[in-house]
Image (cartoon, grey):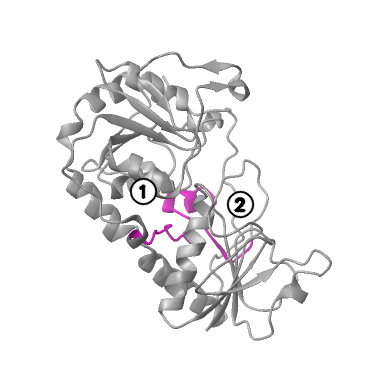
Amino acid sequence: MNILIEYAGIIPAIKYGGTERAIWYLGKELTKMGHHVTYLVLKGSSCDFASILFYDREKTLAEQIPPSTDIIHFLSKNAEQIEKPYIVTIQGNVNDQREFDINTVFVSKDHASRFGSDSYVYNGMDWDDYGKPDLFNKRNYFHFLGDAAWRLKNVQGAIDVIKGTKKEKLKVLGGTRLNLNMGFRFTISPRIHFCGMVGGEKKNQLLQGSKGLIFPVKWSEPFGIALTESLYFGCPVFGTPYGSLPEIINEQVGFLSNSKERLSEAVENVDHYSRVTCHEYARDIFNSKKMAEQYLKKYWLVLNGEQLNRLPPKLKKIQSEKFLEWK
């Protein structure tokens, strides 16, 4: 099968880049399965296992699709006026009631259900790229992983959870100690260390030394690659019960609450969780092979003339509050 993956960005991921990582590993797995993959992406992209086409802003989208393409997998474009079979993956949230394409795929069951859909595929990583973690090493801190400048990710909540413990430490992966975008947030505590925006081997090394992920998001998280990456390195997750988290984080691999006091208490009892269990769970459930197999099922449905949703997906309920409850 000739598969075109469209994304208005650059691959591979330079730092973190959850979407870039997911589509990179998807294409890699599809290639291993014998399919021919082409990426339609921005200039600056490169790939050693698939073909690359660069966006030409002087041409229509339809004009840039190779005639040999069997199916298109859109990540960032509206598929209107495209005659070839296609699907559209939505990685994020919206808070309005626009209609999405009939062939939309979401990234978790909860994500889909909020739009009246049951069409979803979990993001999966190629864990071979991450190496084999040491699950029995000595670890002396927890970590936050995400864009700390984005208030929905609630880095201040993660800091408060750690401060609520007797002596635990936190490394913030994705932020700085001084952030004017947060309404002048300056963290003084010596128990909090900011690592800036990290990716690749440096990020993996930091996860390797962590006891667990602190993830007190204040929105309905669509999926959360930070969750599965952390679990792969043996880190249980301590987060809020919003979006995909109750679906992904069961009681064997983490604890969920919107109370900082309860999360602090759970963090103090981190030894209750098995690093091996966390690792094997992420490795076996959230891997790129399973992701590719699920997307292939979607491709074949569309190629056979079926639609992925009965009606165009649309947000069932607009969220009136800016942030979900955090206390």
Residue 108 place in picture, x, y as percent:
44, 53
Q: Amino acid at mark 1?
A: Glu
Question: Would you place residue 173 above or below residue 40 in this image?
Answer: above
Task: Name the element at disc 2.
Answer: loop
What residue sits 24% from the left and 15% below the top?
Answer: 166
Residue 137 or residue 104, whichever sits in front? 137
Q: Quadrant of the C terminus?
A: top left
Horizontal side of residue 188 vs 116, given as left or right: left
Determine if the magenta segment contains residue 119: yes
Q: Which residues are magenta?
A: 101-127
Question: Would you place residue 102 above or below residue 274 in this image?
Answer: below
Horizontal side of residue 183 vs 1, given as left or right: right
Secondary structure of the magenta portion, mostly? Answer: loop
The residue carrying mark 2 is 314
Horizontal side of residue 87 vs 121, given as left or right: right
Q: Quadrant of residue 292?
A: bottom left
Camera sees residue 325? no
Residue 184 place in picture, x, y as percent:
59, 16
What residue sits 35% from the left and 26% below the top?
Answer: 170
Determine if the magenta segment contains residue 248: no
Task: Name the element at disc 1.
Answer: helix
Q: Earlier in the sequence, mark 2 or mark 1?
A: 1
Q: Residues within 10 Å of mark 2 (few under 14, many from 20)?
A: some
Circles 2, 1 touching at the beta carbon (< 8 Å): no
What residue sits 44% from the left and 83% below the top?
Answer: 34
Question: Would you place residue 165 above or below residue 89 in this image?
Answer: above
The residue carrying mark 1 is 229
What residue sits 56% from the left and 32% below the top?
Answer: 150
Camera sees residue 72? yes
